[in-house]
Amino acid sequence: MVQSKSCMAGCAGKTARVLLIVFNILFAVCGVTILAVGIWLRVDPSVVQLQELVNLDSKNPNLANAAYILIGFGGFMLLVSVFGCCGGIQKSRILLGLYIACLVIIFIGQITAGILAALYKTDVEHTIESNLLGVLENDYKPGRTKYTQPWDYVQVWLHCCGVHNYTDYKDIKFGVGQMVPLTCCILENEDPNDPMPKNNTRCQLEANQTVAGEFLKPLGCLDGVTNAIKEYDGILIGVAIGIAVIEILGILLACCVCKNIHSEKLA
């Protein structure tokens, strides 16, 4: 009877270790994904230009910091998954204890980040709007590549024009007959460095008449950014919930493995 219980405990311990390793592989995959997203935010030309555009009128490079936070968080998740796998394979209570502590920290951090994101969402939107308007109203002038290039990239990428719409350019002096940048027009290509409007004459005419039509983009870039974020809201929430579930299961499995290791030593 005692031998049977010992055998069952051993099987349960092995099962827990296997599951722990499997969950940590999934956790590592999540870490790699987050790391990749962070790197993408720092290397994709359109996203980088959006970051520069928002940061031009701000002393706080929040978007760039967000990318680095994701990179650091993804790397930390990879490290934690190594602790979990090694702890399970080597039956190390020290590594498993460290693993549990790290998961608790990550879990608390996720909850805190979610609360802060909900609380400061409106403030962030206002900051982005204020920074974009500041750059457009105070610094944007044809020929000033530092300010015009980011706008061109963003307007091509998000298919938008201006902050709220094309009327934001009404006080900016372009060439004769030009009311808005070429990237505000409906384009035949997706090249911000060499935009080719379908009909530039009609586009500028629509801008002059303040009526967006067939050849002028009606969407403002602030709405474009908001729409782009909303498009991935569901995915982000789903990933966050999935990671949280993996973390909770990882903590429970690690505790089971630790208990089993302790029992084996006493036996």
Image (tube, rainbow, N blue to C red):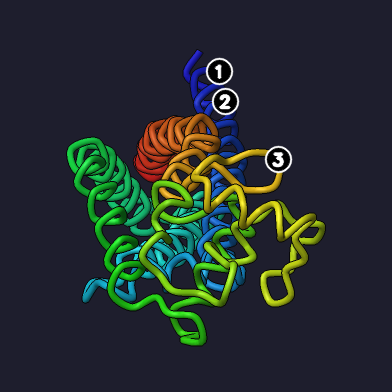
Of tags 1 and 3, the one toward the viewer is 3
Residue drawn at the location 44% of the way across and 78% of the way down: 147
**Residue receiving disc 3:** 214
Rendered view: 54 above or below 128: below
Return the x and y of residue 114 as percentages of the image width and height.
28, 39
For mark 3, give the secondary structure: loop
Q: Quadrant of the C terminus?
A: top left
Is label 2 in contact with label 1 (beta carbons under 8 Å)? yes
Residue drawn at the location 51% of the way across and 87% of the way down: 143
Of tags 3 and 2, the one toward the viewer is 3
- Label 2 is placed on what type of residue? Cys
Label 2 vs label 1: CA separation? 5 Å
**Residue receiving disc 2:** 7
Label 3 vs label 2: CA separation? 75 Å
- Label 1 is placed on what type of residue? Ser
- Could you classify mark 1 by the number of other residues whose Cα lies within 10 Å: few (under 14), some (14-19), or many (20 or more)? few
Return the x and y of residue 216 as percentages of the image width and height.
63, 48
